[in-house]
Image (cartoon, rainbow, N blue to C red):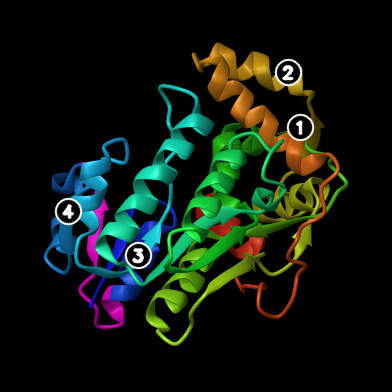
Amino acid sequence: MTTGVMAPKGNVGAHVLRLLIQAGERPRALLRDPGTLDSEVSELVETATCDVGDPQSVIDATAGLSALYWVSPTAMDRDPVAAHREVAEHLSAAVQRNGIERVVFQSSGGAEKRQGVGEIDGLAAIEVALDACGASVTHLRCGYFFTNLLMDAEGIRSGALSTAMDPDRPLPWVAPADVAAVAASRLLGGSWTGRHVQGVHGPEDLSFRDVASVLAEVLGHDVTVNQVSDDDVRTQLASLGMGQDSVEAIVGMTAGIRDDYTPEQPRSYVTTTPTTLRSWASAHLT
């Protein structure tokens, strides 16, 4: 009985791998180049080469697995939504071919809309494909990752937090390590069957103004919210060399959550996780 972990060096996957090892498992790390896995970790796991763009590679990498944690990587060289839809076909074929019993999929809040949420539309396509493949599946509809703040770390340390979101609208914010804890619990808990959707919402909903206030306390200086337009974001991303499809996937993701969106999974005891923004920021932004 082996559990596979996709993206085992990622913000969530690295924690999932560690938790499974600490639980006494010998999971299989799935990554494009197994040689890049830290040697200390590689001694404790199986490894398999997994190229998500190659359907046979996905089938071979997941052969013999009883459970699978899957995160679909963002394509940087082409339309991310189309790439996720391609991955959906490869993944569902592998799950069916290999008879994988349980899959925990790292999805996102907004996937329930199925369209109009930028890159999240691709995650929705993976949800649909997994629902049809015959395995028991849990979709983790995650909130806004604390680690997204690292993309604006320089601006935050200079006193400005930029966003195209409504700065006064509360959103669920979550630590990747907490997402991993929920994923690992599902992977290790063998009693569930069927289709499940679970929100992973962090300890509290926060607006960007709330976030700026917490960051100001942690950093010891004022942090103000700078609201930008979607076109401002387009210009900034294009200046970094991103292609139009990638730019629109990011802009659409923000707009889809910002405009006319009510989460399908409300905050509850089950969706609430413990790590606070204050503790995370103290560890990662100071």
Front of the two marks 2 and 3: 3
Q: Amino acid at mark 1?
A: Ala
**Disc 2 packing (10 Å; few <14; some 14–19; many ≥20):** few
* Helix, strand or loop under label 2: helix
Q: Quick check: is 27 in the magenta stretch? A: yes
Label 4, label 2: how far apart the Cα atoms are: 41 Å
Position in image of residue 277 (x %, y %): 65, 60
Residue picked out by circle 3: 68
In the image, which residues are magenta?
21-32
Q: Amino acid at mark 2?
A: Asp
For the point 50% across and 49% down, the residue is 126
Residue picked out by circle 2: 232
User: How many numbered discs sit on the rendered protein?
Assistant: 4
Q: Amino acid at mark 3?
A: Leu
Q: Nearer the viewer, residue 10 or 248?
A: 248
Look at the numbered discs 1 and 2 and tell me whether their residues touch, using CB distance below 8 Å: yes
Work out whether residue 222 can be spotted. Answer: no
Label 2, label 3: how far apart the Cα atoms are: 39 Å
Residue picked out by circle 4: 48
Q: Earlier in the sequence, mark 2 or mark 3?
A: 3
Residue picked out by circle 1: 164
Label 1, label 4: how far apart the Cα atoms are: 39 Å
Q: Earlier in the sequence, mark 1 or mark 3?
A: 3
Q: Earlier in the sequence, mark 1 or mark 4?
A: 4
Q: Nearer the viewer, residue 16 or 265?
A: 265
**Disc 4 packing (10 Å; few <14; some 14–19; many ≥20):** many
The image quadrant that residue 268 belongs to is: bottom right
For the point 55% across and 45% down, the residue is 125
Q: Which mark is residue 132?
A: none
- When the figure is inspected, residue 244 is found, relative to residue 274, above or below; the finding is above
* Helix, strand or loop under label 4: strand
